[in-house]
Image (tube, rainbow, N blue to C red):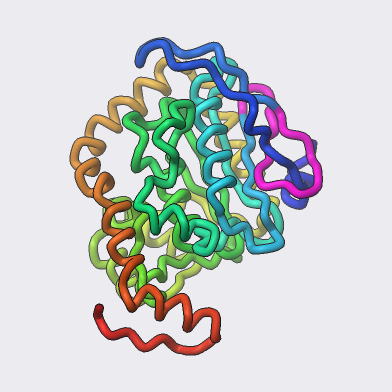
Amino acid sequence: MKASALLGGLAVLPVSASPQTRQSSNKMNRATLEDVPLSSGAKLTIERRDSIALIGINRPDIQNRIDPETYLALARALYTFDNDSSLRAAVVFGHGENFSQGIDVTAFAPVIASGQPFLPELEHESHDPLEKASPDRLSKPLIAVVHGDTWNMAHEIFLAADIRVAANNTNFGQDENTHGRFPGGGSTVRFVREAGWGNAMRYMLTGEHWNADEAYRMGLVQHVANSASNALSVGLDIAKRISACAPLGVRTTLESAHLAIVPYETPALSKLDAQFGQLFHTRDFAEGRKADAEARKPEFKGY
């Protein structure tokens, strides 16, 4: 399957197939991440290329907004990838014109209102794409390749990756404050860490968007490509270079780096769902959604 086909394809991740339970933190499972063929009505695609997995968000009809089903499918795919001994790196990207415009608020509303986590507590064979709930970080490299709109939750999934590539048409946004919400998927932690306090606060507090060159200036991306297809090619090339390295050395490198940051970030990440849930029940949150639906400027009151 060619990269150009991936960018425009459709596929469904079967939810019936689950990897075996992790036996220990030091021993990988014999799980197998299966290819997901192109098909209509899709939400996620998976393609194996030797020791690399390509994982595609695929809801182009609504700008790849992420609903609970897509989020769970991505979580299961990441878990299985991490436990598949034949895979050494993964690339996550978006089909169609955008990487993703972020959370599908309407679809997630019942989950948020109930106060439940985005991943069901009984989903043991899944890895949180935002790395808020999972006790461990991925033990293998994840490369994010983005293009077009990359907003809010999508930007936070992008920040959770180890290496990031962007097409020059990427439109980044972390504008929840303009909608009565806040960045509840990790940007208050990772955006600040990656770009510095002032850069992160400028964009989170104002809701202004920024382009790929600005993302490169802030250190959020490691390469800017001249098109979406070229960005995917660059991401694949990086994955191939990683796959040619010693897998135990790569794993230990990630493990060591995670030890330096995870203990300090965990307290803030663990409170994000509760903080988001508190805002969900405010008048300003409702006003933000109503203003969006009516295509007008919201009038926030602070309660």
Residue beneath the point at 71% across and 62% down? 61
Residue beneath the point at 45% across and 33% down? 127
Q: Position of residue 214 (x, y in %)?
A: 43, 66
Residue 43 sits inside the magenta stretch: yes
Residue beneath the point at 45% across and 61% down? 152
Q: Position of residue 120 (x, y in %)?
A: 44, 39
Q: Is residue 190 visible?
A: yes
Query: Would you say 264 lies left or right of 192 here?
Result: left
Q: Position of residue 184 (x, y in %)?
A: 35, 57
Residue 122 higher or lower than 171, as above or below: above
Q: Is residue 207 visible?
A: no
Looking at the figure, which quarter contains the C terminus? bottom left
Range of magenta residues: 35-52
Query: Would you say 69 lies left or right of 288 here?
Result: right
Q: Quadrant of residue 121?
A: top left
Looking at the figure, which quarter contains the N terminus? top right
Query: Would you say 298 lies left or right of 170 here?
Result: left
Residue 130 sits inside the magenta stretch: no
Dominant secondary structure of the magenta stretch? loop
